[in-house]
Image (cartoon, grey):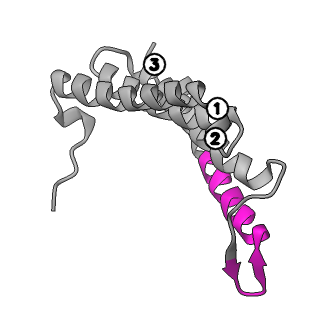
Amino acid sequence: MPRYRSLETLSSGQKVLTGSAMGLVGLIVLVLMLANPEKLRVPTWVGLSAAIAFIIAGSAVALHSFISRRAYLWCMVGLLATMTSVPAWIAIGPGQRSCTASIPLLSGELPCRLAFAVGALVCLSLCVAAAREASKRGEA
């Protein structure tokens, strides 16, 4: 089983290569979505939010060695904010979803939306915690 490697164990070159690949994937997806928005099964902003999450994550990894701790932490806040928007839209956005779940005494769309609401709340709480950390502990 491969060992987990934190960003601190990677060389600057490895970070740039890995982050650039992640960002490129997000950029390709973003361009494809903008070229064919009619093929999306979600509002365009939801798809773009998911693609932007890859771009932010890739940028943060690529720039990890070259930016301040505070700037990196704010990248994480942006990443968590984009990651919050997708499950939040599934949970409370208008219209029916092709998502169903079954839990005791509940089945259909409601438990699915409830599950995504829990996920959105978890992401939101992580985003708030990251913002607090970035604003008080990050170096200038």
Residue placed under numbered mark 2 in the picture: 40
CA–CA distance in space, label 2 to label 1: 5 Å
SS class, disc 3: helix
Q: Quadrant of residue 86?
A: top right
Position in image of residue 100 (x %, y %): 69, 70
Specify the amino acid type for callout 1.
Pro
Disc nearer the start of the sequence (3/1): 1
Label 1 Cα crowd, 10 Å radius (few <14 / some 14-19 / many 20+): some
Q: Is residue 119 magenta?
A: yes
Residue placed under numbered mark 3 in the picture: 71
- Residue, far right: 94
Q: Quadrant of residue 136?
A: top right
Position in image of residue 51 (x %, y %): 51, 33
Residue sitting nearer the eye, 30 or 74? 30
SS class, disc 1: helix
In the depicted structure, whether residue 93 falls above or below residue 19: below
SS class, disc 2: loop
Q: Is residue 75 left or right of residue 41?
A: left
